Amino acid sequence: MPVAVAADAARRFEEACEHARISRDTHELLMRPKSSLEVAIPLRRDDGSLEVYAGYRVRFDDTRGPAKGGIRFHPDVDPQEVTTLAFWMTCKTAVMDLPFGGGKGGVAVDPKQLSAAELERLSRAYVAAVADVLGADVDVPAPDVATDEMVMGWMAHELARIRRGHQPAAVTGKPLALGGIPGRSSATSEGAFHVLEELRASLLGDLDEPSVAIQGFGNAGAQLASRLAGAGYRVVAVSDSSAAVHDDDGLDVEALRAHKDRTGSLQDPPSGEQLDAGRVLTLDVDVLAPAALEGAVHEGNAADVRARMILEVANGPVTAAADTILDEAGVQLVPDILANAGGVTVSWFEWIQGRQGEQWSAEDVAERLEARMLRETGAVVRIGQERNLPLRTAAYVHALERLTEAIDATGTAELFSGG
Ligand code: GLU
């Protein structure tokens, strides 16, 4: 039997099941992934030595469509993390009503220790190792932590080589020149921006220039900082794994992005005051946007959070124990499976484009992304109001009720709970 999700994710699932009208079948099926593949990935290093890394691809559920989810390169990747992330993808695609299930992959490696050529060989070797379980109708990978469009280009190219033919819908997040779609790399931040704007009046009132702190200055975090700074928000702090930068009058986000591109970190910033990286989570701001890894806000620091609301741009940045503390303190939380769903939504557009041999414009992508984000944000808010649930639980209920419709349509089911 494959490894189950982390205890935290299981607890939230059980809580949501108490409020969702789902069948017993759905509850049983979603307690563990459908399949989980573990592989050894050999990499020839530039110095001629051979290193073998652990790689994974988990298909959590594919009742609603092919499994969908990113591939992560990070030293902490392990079977339980990948499984948990695949479960969240299953819920995320259901929240957005995309014709996908959920999957995730990863390699336990520190990509910062690899040369560009080693990274390319590793990306190709990963695809070679898991190719049997991939495909446009089966399981469709995408970028995640430390895997960008260049990595997706290598992976798509390798899959085409193995299958001896182009597979434009089998990998998303590809470079434009290899069948990618305009706006995919900014899709996560763009989606989060739309969700925030939609909820702004109800969560923040008519506040002028809300202040924002962003933890994580990778693809999603840095692009969100630019987007918000250009839309009347005051981005007062950003951090990466090594440092945080703070300025109450608002940071010069573009100068910081240029600094990070040039030096690789936020240390010794051109302007603003430097803080310890962890301090960004406890600043007195209107919006805190964790955009790095899981578990950033936990039992040990949740009581120190001073933000009025948290926008979960990363997957799983707030633990279940922290949820309870934040809820009691009145901190509003916009959950990851809604807030960061813009990425997979534009992956869906890329998948359609690839299957149909189309070329979408940036305008089409922007318009359809915004429409979908607003539609499903509205649906989650309505469930929250009607059943008196926080947004996180409402988002899970929304997802689980869509999942149960599909799962029950595949066979007979008895009711699990009234909700
Ligand atoms: N890695 C992204 C996520 O966690 C995108 C997944 C996808 O596009 O399939 O949502």
Image (cartoon, rainbow, N blue to C red):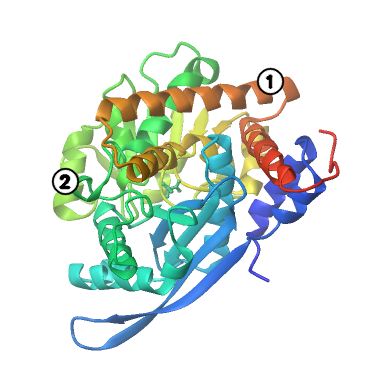
Amino acid at the residue labelled 1: Gln
Local SS, label 1: helix
Residue at 19% over, 45% down: 269
Using residue 374 as the reference point, say whether residue 179 is left or right of it: left
Question: Quadrant location of the C terminus?
Answer: top right
| Residue farthest along the bottom direction in this orientation | 49
Residue at 48% over, 56% down: 139
Q: How many labels, in total? A: 2
Category of crowding for the residue at label 2, using alpha-carbon neighbours closer than 10 angstroms: few (below 14), some (14–19), many (at least 20): some
**Residue in the foreground of this view, choosing between 179 and 316:** 179
**Residue in the foreground of this view, choosing between 277 and 71:** 71
How much space separates mark 1 and mark 2, taking CA atoms? 44 Å
Amino acid at the residue labelled 2: His
Would you identify the image quadrant in which residue 208 lies? top left
x and y percent of residue 326 in the render?
A: 61, 37
Q: Is residue 228 visible?
A: no
| Residue farthest along the top direction in this orientation | 206
x and y percent of residue 361 in the render?
A: 25, 30
Residue underneath mark 2: 259
x and y percent of residue 143 in the render?
A: 36, 53
Residue at 66% over, 30% down: 390
The relative height of residue 60 versus residue 406 in the rendered view (above or below) is below
Q: Is residue 342 visible?
A: yes
Category of crowding for the residue at label 1, using alpha-carbon neighbours closer than 10 angstroms: few (below 14), some (14–19), many (at least 20): few
Question: Quadrant location of the N terminus?
Answer: bottom right
